[in-house]
Structure formats: C-alpha cells, structure tokens
Amino acid sequence: MKTTMQDSGVGMNRRGFLTRSMLAAGAMYGGLVVSRGLGQGVAASEKVRVGLVGCGGMGKGDLATFFLNPEVECPVVCDVDPKMIGEASKMVEEKRGRRPETAKDFRAVLDRKDVDCVLVATPDHWHALPTVLACQAGKDVYVEKPLATSIREGRAMITAAEKHQRVVQMGTQWRSGKHFAEAVAYVQSGKLGKVSLVRGWAYHDWLPACPKKPDGDVPAGVDYDFWLGPAPKHAFNPNRFHFNFRWFWDYAGGLMTDWGVHLINVMLWAMGPQPPKSVMSSGGNLNRDEAWETPDAQMAVYEFPDYMLVWEHKNGVGIGLNSRPWGMSFTGTDATLFLTDAGFEVLSERRKGGEEPVKFPGSGDARPAHVRNFLDCVKSRQQPVENLVVGHHVSTVAHLGNVAFRAGRKIYWDHERERIIGDKDADRLVGVQYRKPWKLPYYPAS
C-alpha cells in the first residue's frame, strides 16, 4: 500500500469544475457518470460488502442504516479499541446472523477482496488517509463529515477519487432530505425576493460535560499510537478520546465543523456554488470549566459575492435564534424562510402585506435515503448527491471560519489557488502537518 507524497495533478479550472459538479448534484439523485473499468463496482443483483473503519457511535449508527438495505453485508469491522470492535461485531451478528472478522489497522480492510466499499467513521483526523488509500485500493467510500481536519486534505481526497474513478459520498445526510430539497427549491424560486442574508445557528444544551482531567493510562487493549496516527504526539487524556476528540484542534474543528458543516451544507446548496471572498470570526471558551480547545461560543461572518452568511454556535444553552435550538434562515426582500429538521415556514415582510406564516412539514430522517443514494451510485457508477467536490466546498467554508478564528483577524480567500491572500500565518492553517511516518498521497504542494 503506497503512503508516499504525490502531486495532486489537478489541471482543470477549479471554479468551473465546482460549479458544474454542484449543479449536477443539486437534483436529489442526479450526478455525473464516470466510466466503469473492468471489475470495478458491483452489479445490481450482487451484495454490497461494506468494511467499517471506526466503530464508535457514529460508525455503528451509520452501519445500522446501511443494514436497512438487504443487499448490504459487513465482512469486517476495524477499530483501535477492542471494546468498540466488540460492540460493532455484536451488532453485525444481530443484523446479519454471523460475526464479522476484525482488524485494528484499516489497511487490512483495504487489502480484502471481499470488501467493495469502506465506511469511514473515525475521528476527523483519520478521514483523509483511509479515504485516499481506499480509492487507491479500488474501493468506494462513504466518509463522515467534515472531509478532514484541513482544506488541503480535502483536495487530496478529490484527486484520489477522480484519479481512481471512485464513488465517494460525504455523510451530511440532509442533501438527501425531501423537505430540505423543497426548502432549497423555494429559496431558488425567487418567492423570497432577493436573498442577501443567510444565517445558521446551533445552541446545544445536551452535549456531555467535558471537565478538565489529568493525563492518564491508555485503556487496556487500545492502540493509542495508532489512534493518534498523523496527529501530533500527546499523552493519553480521556477528554481527547472517543466523543470528546471533537473539541481539540489536533483531531477536529469543534462545533464549527461538527454541526456547522450540516447547516452550511444546506445554505450553500440553496445559494449556489460561489465561494466566499472573506471571513471573520470571534468567540472563545466562555464556560471556563470545560476542557475544550475549540470555542464553545463562536460567530463567523462570510462575505460571498452576492450575499452574507452568518454562522453561530453556543454550548450549554438550548434556546437559539427565533426560539429554535438550531436552524437556518434565508432573508429576502419579500420574505424569510426558516428551516429545521421539523420542516420550514415562510414569513412575509410586513411592508409586503405579510400574512400568517406558511408552514411546510418535515420529511423525517434523511440518513436512509442518503445511504441508499450511495449504494445506488456504487452500482450505477454515477456520482452521488454529496460527491467529494460538493463535500469539499462545504467543508472548506466551515474550515475557513476556524482559520479566521485561530488567526484572530479577517482573512481573504483565493478560491482558485485555495490560499489565504497576503497572510502566511493564516495560510498555514489551510493545511496540516502529518506526524511521521504518515504521509498523505496527492496532498497538494503548499
């Protein structure tokens, strides 16, 4: 298995490709057809054999959704924690009648001939390498969001998928949600008038506490050095492991990339493929008792060519904007649309003779449809609704909010070169330094 640095080889105009790919993915199950080589993919009548890499809560939840489809089998599960492996193995046995084989090293999954696609549900710092190497190994990939911990890793993932003609879906399931698609169509219909302000927010009072704890012993059986992988060496701390990894810069981007990606995804879907011009962000850890490195309160303001986008989050409270703990709003000259998983409603401007809000119902959990879209594309060789070009665009916007926050100043984005303009220190945050001996194929030259 190759783990050497290679050039990305991206020759096409990124803006044009982004526009075409996002427009193609705008339809619920539309996509661009890629050629199908001998032995690639699976026929419609065959089983789809999924290897699970990352057996935590998200991995087991995703796999359970895959199992809603009778053609899915899972011959192997992989994790560095034997406890997580045991839980996932038990679930596979309950769902499919036999226990899977197990592995601690994801590369053992990629080497198997009885694996058609890989479900990557690891911590964020482990998204890029398994995805890129899976593409090299001829496997399709369903990878959780965000694509990785940095923008340049996402570019490497796109290059790998294109070069090896792989189907790769990012797991932000609202792209496959019926009422989300209806809300997007409403925004794009012009009924709101000119939309120039878009907002997304997430106020969470349900997240588990993360009080400061001393470093300690690695849990029995856990390969902690492999868990760290490309991330910097650090003594084991229970706060940095499993669920709470989200709140540490070495492994993730906090609520900005954990929840922000979901909502920013839908906002960009509605507003089109244009990239942001500039971003500024502020916030901090206002709850001093928590061990978070990433901000528990943050606001990011993005300037796009035709509109402004505002993201904000706050941990520890549950009453968000418009009395909704989380949601999105699209403010037009004639009306405003509010959107959550429960549905959406439209409020007309008073000066336009505003009427009572018009309400549209929600459509339930979108995850089964999102997984079904991926499985259909594995068979048809079409690109899925959340292909890597779309996923990279969405993840990039979220990452830029964190880059601006960590830089402590407004940043200006060169979309064509994927660089911060005139700010070398901020531009370093666009990429990430891998700990030796790990190297990411196709990682672009900085």
Image (spheres, grey):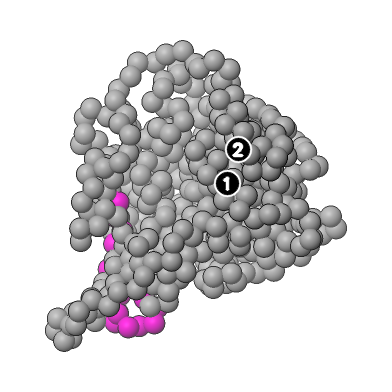
Query: Would you name the residue on which mark 2 appears?
Result: 91
Query: Looking at the image, is 5 positioned above or below residue 240?
Result: below
Residue 417 appears in the figure: no
Query: Looking at the image, is 335 positioned above or below residue 36?
Result: below
Residue with the most extreme left position? 351
Name the disc covering residue 92, or none. none
> Residue at position x 62%, y 33% from top?
90
- Bounds of the magenta segment: 187-202
* Of the image marks 1 and 2, the number of the one nearer the N terminus: 1
Residue 121 appears in the figure: yes
Q: Position of residue 369 (x, y in %)?
A: 55, 61
Label 2's element?
Answer: helix
Q: Position of residue 278 (x, y in %)?
A: 34, 58
Q: Given contact means CB atoms under 8 Å apart, are the residues at marks 1 and 2 in contact?
A: yes
Where on the picture, by quarter, is residue 307? bottom left
Query: Looking at the image, is 74 positioned above or below residue 251?
Result: below
Who is closer to the viewer here, 150 or 444? 150
> Residue at position x 69%, y 51% from top?
72
Q: Which amino acid type is marked by label 1?
A: Ala
> Residue at position x 43%, y 34% from top?
243
Who is closer to the viewer here, 65 or 373? 65
Indicate yes or no whether the magenta region holds residue 195: yes
Residue with the most extreme right position? 38
> Residue at position x 46%, y 30% from top?
242
Query: Looking at the image, is 226 positioned above or below residue 134?
Result: above
What is the distance, in whole Å, between disc 1 and disc 2 at their CAs? 8 Å
Query: Would you name the residue on which mark 1 appears?
Result: 64
Indicate yes or no whether the magenta region holds residue 174: no
Where on the picture, by quarter, is residue 316? top left
Q: Position of residue 26 (x, y in %)?
A: 52, 71
Q: Position of residue 66 (x, y in %)?
A: 61, 51
